[in-house]
Amino acid sequence: MGSAVAIAAPNVSKVREIRPQPGLQTKFLSSSADIVIGGGAAGSSKTFSLLMEALRHVDVPGFGAVIFRRESPQITNQGGLWDESENIYTGLYGAKPNRNDLSWTFYPAKAKIRFSHMQLAADRFNWDGSQIPLIGYDQLESFEEIQFWYMLSRNRTTCGVRPYVRATCNPVPEDDATGGWLCKLIAWWIDQETGYPIKERSGIIRWFARRNETIHWADSRGALLEMFPNVAAEDLEPKSFTFIPGSLRDNPILTKKDPGYRGNLLALSLVERERLLYGNWKIKPDAGKVFNRAWFKFMLRAIPTDINFLVRYWDKAGTEGGGAYSAGALVGRRSNGRHVLLNIKRGQWSANNREVMIQQTAAADTEMARSLGCPLEIWVEQEPGSGGKESAQSTVMNLAGYTIKLDRVTGAKLTRALPASAQAEAGNIDLMENLGETLQGVSALEAFLTEAQNFNGVSGVKDQVDAFSGAFNHVSLKRSVSLVW
């Protein structure tokens, strides 16, 4: 591919120079591998590198590049692919944008760079018959394995440019339902004990070939061919591959323009901070990593008088005496910016008894809000499907006269818990020493701490944590308001 060079707009009086920064960008743009995957941490300017690579052959007639995101809104979101392409491509090589089909055409060669989504696995068939010299993926870990390998069959050309693939990514563990295949694919470049990239292997090219549904690796093309002496070279056709890790340190331009960005990453929960700041591919939300009981340092005996907003959040179940628990968490926000978990209601109630409990709790919460002079909101999680909608609407009707809202939840429970996780780790969430009733000999405080310690968002009991996270998310978004009752 050759080394990266500065790109300037031709035939203009002012030359606008765009040059990669040392580190990830330079290595990414200089690699000769058929497939290059770069990234592993946020802020390393992975997307910039991908957009720059697409410019390399825009002076070649017939050249084209397609850069994929999993979903279409990710392309046009503020600061996303399209916005970044406008910052880079405007004025270069007679570039003409077309926002309707999210493409750029470069004259006089008429080379084209297009942005597209591939939301469903079946969307890969929409590209049958296509010839794409350069296929790019922004955040490859969000794509399914079958999409990546199938699209290699579209990676072909007659324009004279050797077809190749470039992709960016963020870390996910190997058991991730969507992107775990990528973690396994780049395993040679990752320390399998720590999960961090092996610096000495950054950018080193290896060769692979698939035989009998198994991917075989070697350090050179010749070595791979020698592994299969009875297979003709054209039937094996090894491809070259490398992984180039990056971090925020590779992007001093960003840290200069936005010196607080590192602080944003440091404020993430432990799991997300390890992934997005330090590029850890092995970190998982195991026990004690999402919530750790040691993070809750202050157990309060009296309700703080400076609470300025209250939210009770209900995560409902409907089986009496067994199955999942219904749980309702009451969280208050204090004027000093701290949050406090004031109360947990939990039980295996029948649907009718649960609604009675929710009504009684609403009355008690209202009295507390009046004494504190602050607003109270009651939120109920609405599960997907008609049954979840009917159950949530029933609770709304039963709480007529209260400020009650439905939470039509999306995304994983772990994702919804991460904001509270980050604040808990920072020591900004307090607990009441008396969180509620003792059940089966276990205090409400101990029951919550045990569940929080073991929470991983996937398995085990998680009803109290779901309710706590829901209450925290809604109370933390509100501005300070006081009421006169």
Image: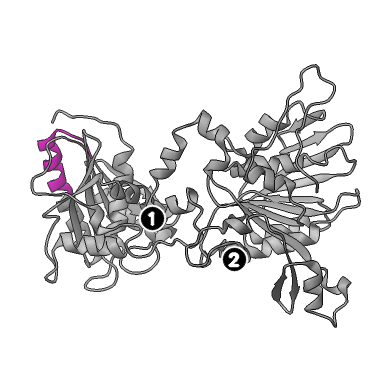
Q: How is the image coloured?
A: one colour
**Measured from the top left, where is residue 203 in percent x and y?**
67, 55
Circle 2 packing at 10 Å, graded few (<14), some (14-19), many (20+), is some
Instruction: Identify which residue, 448 or 31, lies in the foreground.
Output: 31
Tell whether label 1 touches label 2 (CB within 8 Å).
Answer: no
Residue 23 visible in rendering:
yes
Answer whether residue 371 is magenta in the image: yes
Left or right placement of residue 360 versus residue 407 in this view: left
**Magenta residues, dominant SS class:** helix
Q: Residue furthest top?
A: 13
Q: Residue furthest bottom?
A: 230
Left or right placement of residue 188 versus residue 401 in this view: right
Mark 2: which secondary structure?
helix
Residue 78 visible in rendering:
no
The stretch in magenta equals 362-376
**Measured from the top left, where is residue 453 in percent x and y?**
28, 62
Which amino acid is tagged 1? Answer: Lys
Residue 79, image quadrant = top right
Q: Which residue is mark 1?
A: 389
Q: Which residue is mark 2?
A: 187
Instruction: Identify which residue, 404 or 246, lies in the foreground.
Output: 246
Answer whether residue 51 is magenta in the image: no
